Image: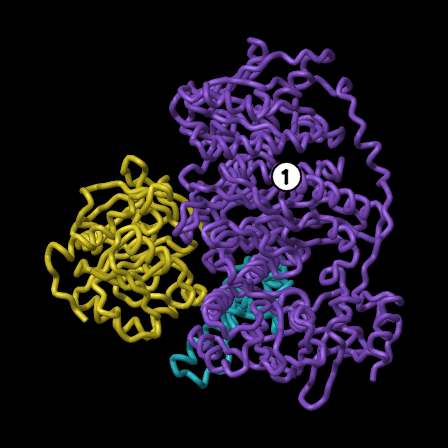
Amino acid sequence: MKFAIVVFPGSNCDHDAYYATKHVLGADAEFVWHKELGLQGADVVILPGGFSYGDYLRTGSIARFSPVMASVMAFAEAGGPVLGICNGFQILLETGLLPGGMLYNRSVKFQCEQVYVRVEELETPFTCTATPGQVLRIPIAHGEGNYFAPPDELDLLEANRQVVFRYCDVEGAVVDAANPNGSARGIAGLCNKQRNVVALMPHPERACESAMGSADGLVVFESAIAQLKSDGMVLPG
Amino acid sequence: MVTINSKTLDHHGLSREEYQKILEILGREPSPTEIGIFSVMWSEHCSYKSSRIHLRTLPTTGARVVQGPGENAGAVDVGDGLVAVFKIESHNHPSFIEPYQGAATGVGGIIRDIFTMGARPIALLNSLRFGSLNDAKTRGILEGVVAGIGGYGNSIGIPTVGGEILFEDTYKGNPLVNVFCLGLAQAGKLVMGEASGAGNPVYYVGAKTGRDGIHGATMASAEFDEQSSEKRPAVQVGDPFMEKLLLEACLELMQTNALVGIQDMGAAGLTCSTSEMGSRGGVGIDIDVTRVPQRESGMTPYEIMLSESQERMLMVVHRGREAEVERIFKKWDLHAVSIGVVTDDGQLRVREGDSVVAEIPNGKLADEAPCYNRPTEIPGYLEQVRHLDLEALPVLPAAESALLKLLGSLAVTSKHWVYRQYDHMVRTNTIAPAGMGAGVVRLKGTDRALAISVDGNGRHCYLDPHLGAMLAVAEAARNVACAGALPIGATNCLNFGNPERPEIMWQFARAVEGIGEACRALELPITGGNVSFYNETDGQAIYPTPVLGVVGVIENASSVLNRVFPSSQSAILLLGGGSGVLGGSEYLKTVCGQVAGSLAPLSLDSERRLQQLLVELAAAGLIQSAHDCSDGGLAVALAECCFDSGGAGADLMMPDDASGGRTDVAEASILFGEAPSRVLVSIAESDFGIVRKKVEIAGVPIAAQGQTGGDRITISLAGRKVLDLSVADAEAAWRQGMERFFVNRAA
Amino acid sequence: MKARVFVTLKESVFDPQGQTIADALHTMDYDRVRNVRQGKYFELELDVETVDDARALANEVADRLLANPVIESYRIDVEDETIGVSK
C-alpha cells in the first residue's frame, strides 16, 4: 500500500501530504519528482497543493506538461486512484481529466480558513468509508477556487453523480453563506466519470490530527487504504 | 577616469571625511565602481554607522545562544538537537513606493536570511503600521501590503502564523512593514556566510541581475552614465517561485559538505555579499562581472555590483566539488555560475573581462566603516505631551459604549480580514488558531513547540522611548509566556526618524537602553535584528517604533494555551497587581482623542515572576487560557477572552480602588487604563486551591477574581456593577472594526 | 466607442511570470520563442463622441487605476466602430 506524492517545482503541501499518509496513517509514501517518468509502483497518486510554477500564466497550466504527468494520466486511465488537492485539482482541470475551470474567489482575495464540506458521494476511492452526507471540517487555502463550468456541464456532473464534496454550513446545509469562494453549486470536489480520479480544493491533509484543529480529513486517506485492501485491486503501472 | 567632485559624493551619500578615509585606504582616487561599493557598504543600511555604538550595549549572549548578531540571522538552542534561526527586518520605504512588491520582497529577503543559515523556514510573522483607514490611499497601501505578504509567503509555502497591526496618523506617509522569519536547523549544522580557502570557486545562483533596486541615495550621478540611470526602476519585483526553487536547492546542497559558505544578495547585492563573505573569512574575493548572469543589456560594472535584484545567492564551494553543486541546482532548473575565486590577498577585486574595475582591501571596507556617536537632545515636545490633567477631561461615556468603541477601534478589532489572506496552516505545524495570541508551531519529531510574538507600541515610545521600549520587550515575552512558552531569545527591528537630528537620536539611544535593560532582566539575549532610520515624511518623523520579536519554547506541545475561555464553567484570575493608568492609553486616544500622559511603570522583577509562573502553570496543565491585558486595558482583555468561545460570558469582581477625584475617571482607569504585567487566566474550579498556592509562592498578586459563564461580560467594583454588556454585541463590534472599511464585493 | 488597454511591466522591471513561461516553453522545445513578457488586457466601453476623447479618457483611467505607473506601462488602442481601429 503505497502513496506517491508528486512534487512539482512550487509544490508546497507535498510534505504535508507525506506526513499525513506516512506518519499519521502509517502507510508507505514516497515523493515522486516531476521529471520522473514512472510512479515507483505506487497504489495511490496524490497531486498535492501549492503553487506549481508559481501559479504563473494559469494555476496548474505549466505543471500539466511536466514529464511525470504522462504516467499520471496513464495510471488514471487504467483506473488507478488519483487525488488532487487544491493546486492538484487545478492541474487535473488543465489536463482535462476533470471538467471545468477555476476563477478567482469572489472575494478576489486569497482565503485561508476552516470550512465545512458535505460528502456527496461515497462511491469513490477517497470517500468510501465516509457516512452519507457526512460533514467534514477542513481548511481551505487558495486564491482561485471558484469552480466554474457551463450549466449543461454542471447538469451532467450532477447526473453522473460526480460532485463529491460541496461547501456547507456546520449542519450540512448547502447555502450560499457557507460557500467561501463562489463555486458553482457549492462544488468543493469532483470525480471523473470512472470515479477513480477525485479532486477537491480543501486540504484534508491539514485536518488529520486534533492538534491541527480537526481530524476530519483522515476519512479521505483512510478510504483509499480501505478500498485497496477490500477489493485487492489489480494495480496498473 | 572620472574626477570625483562634491556632487558625486552627495549623490552617493558620502561625507568629505568619509571620502578622505577612502583615499587613505586606497592610496589613490577611487574608480566609479569603487565609489559605488564604498557608498553602499558605508551607507547607514549596511554599516549601522549611527546605531552601532548603541547596539553594542545590548545583551547578546546566553546559554542557549548558538549564533549572535553579525551573521545572516541569530540562532538559539531549542533542545532535541535543534536550533531556531530567526530575525526580523524592515521593508518600510519600498512598501510605501509599491506596497505589494515592497512587502513581498521584504518577505523574500528575510526568508533568504534564514535558509542561508542552513535552516528550513517554518514560520513568518509581521508587524505593520499604517495611517488611519479613513484615508483611501492608506487603505490601498494596506491592501497592497497584506496581499504582497500573502502573495509571497503563501506561494513559497511558509505559514504566516502571527503578527500585529497598529494604526496611527504618524505612519500615514511612512508605513512600517517589519517581517520576522524563523527556521529550524540541526544543531552543529549551521552554515555561515564566510568565504575561505584560496582557490575555491565563487558561485552565483538564482535570478538574473537587472537594474532594479539600485538605491536612490547611491544612484549614479550624471557623470557616470545619464542614460543608464534613467532605466533604473527603484522597485524590485519578487519571484516567490524562484525563491522556492532556491530554498529547496540550497537546503539540498547543504546536506552535502560541498559548501564552504553562502550569503544572499540582499541590500547592496553583489557588493555586500562578496565583501562581507570575504571579510568574515579574512580572505580576498576576485570576481568577473561579465560572468554574472544579466537580464538587461549594457549594464556597467557599477550597476552589476549595486543591483538589488531579488532571489540571488552567492556561494563559495570546495574546489573539486563543482560538478556536484551544479547538478543539484540543475535538478531544480537553476543555473549556478562560477563568477570568481577566493584569494589569499584580502582584496575585493572586481574585473570586467581583462580589466580590473575595483580593488579594495576587504577588511578595511568592513572594519574601517564609519561609526558615529551622534549628538542627542531631549525632544521639545516631551514636556508638553507628558502633561495630562485627568480632572479636565470632558464627561466620560458610559463604560459599555466606551468598550464597544474600543472593541471596534483599529487597534483592538479582530484582524481576521488580514490573516485570512495569509496561509497560516501550510506545513501542518500551526497548533494555535490564528488571531488568538502568539503564533505557535510544533516541532515535528519532538514533543516541543515554539511560540513567537512580535510587539511594539510607537505611541508609548513617543511618550517615553525608554519605558516604551522596555514595555515592548515585556509584552512580546509575556505574550509568548501566555502561550505557555518560556521566552529564550529575541530579535529587534528599530524604526526611527533621521538619526542626524539630535532629538531622534535621543529617542533611539533611550529606546536601545530600555531594550537592553529589559532583556537583561528577563534573560532574553538579542541575537540580531535591523535598524531602519529616516522614516520621515516632510520632515516629520514617525513615532519611535522599536518592534521586538520574542521566541519561546514549550516543552510539551499539548500544553499550549490561547486567550479563549473554555466553555465549561471556570474560575478567572487577574494575575499581577499594577493598576491601569489612562496616560498614553488606547482609551485616551480613541475615546478622548488625546495622546498624552505618563505610562504606567514596569517592574521587571514582577514581570519576570509573572512570566515564570505562567510557564509553570501551563506546563502543569493548571490553566486553561491566558491573555495579556494590553491595548484597551482590563475590560478589553476580558471581552477578548470571551470571543471565539461560542458566546460564553464572564463575570469579574474587583475591590474598589478608592482614589478620590472624579468617579468616572477612576472607573475608566480601572476598566480601560493600561499597565504591564497583568494577565487574565482561567482555571478549572477543582484546581483553584493549588493554583492559588502556586501564585502565592511566586509572589504574584491576584488583582481580581471571577467566573466564566452566562452570555454577558460584567465587571463589578466592590459589589457594584460598572460594566455589563452582552458577549454577542461586544463580539459583533469587535468583528466589524476593520472589515467595515473594505465592504466591496461579496466575500 | 471602445478602447483596449494593454498593461505590461516596464521594460526593465523583472517579469517573473514571463520568465517562467518562457522557461516552460523552452523545456517543451519551443526554442524559437526567445522571450515572454506577460501583461494584462482591458476592454473599455466608453460613452464619448470622438476618438480623441476616448483616448484621453482611457489614458486617464489607465494612469489612475488600470496600470501601476511605478512598475507598469500601458498602450491604448481606440476602436471607433464606424471607422475601425485607430492606433
Which residue is depicted at the point 65% across and 39% down? B472
Q: Which residue is mark 1?
A: B522
Apparent colour of chain B: purple
Q: Is residue A164 visible?
A: yes
Q: Is residue C81 visible?
A: no
Tell me which chain appears cyan: C
Which residue is depicted at the point 19% across and 71% down? A237
Which residue extends farthest top? B719
Which residue is depicted at the point 61% across and 21% down? B671
Amino acid of disc 1: Leu
* Image quadrant in which the C terminus of chain B is located: top left
Q: Nearer the viewer, residue A114 or B650?
A: B650
Say above or below: B396 vs B158.
Answer: above
* Image quadrant in which the N terminus of chain B is located: bottom right
- Locate residue A216, reporting x and y percent: 29, 44
Which residue is depicted at the point 59% across and 66% down? B192
Apparent colour of chain A: yellow
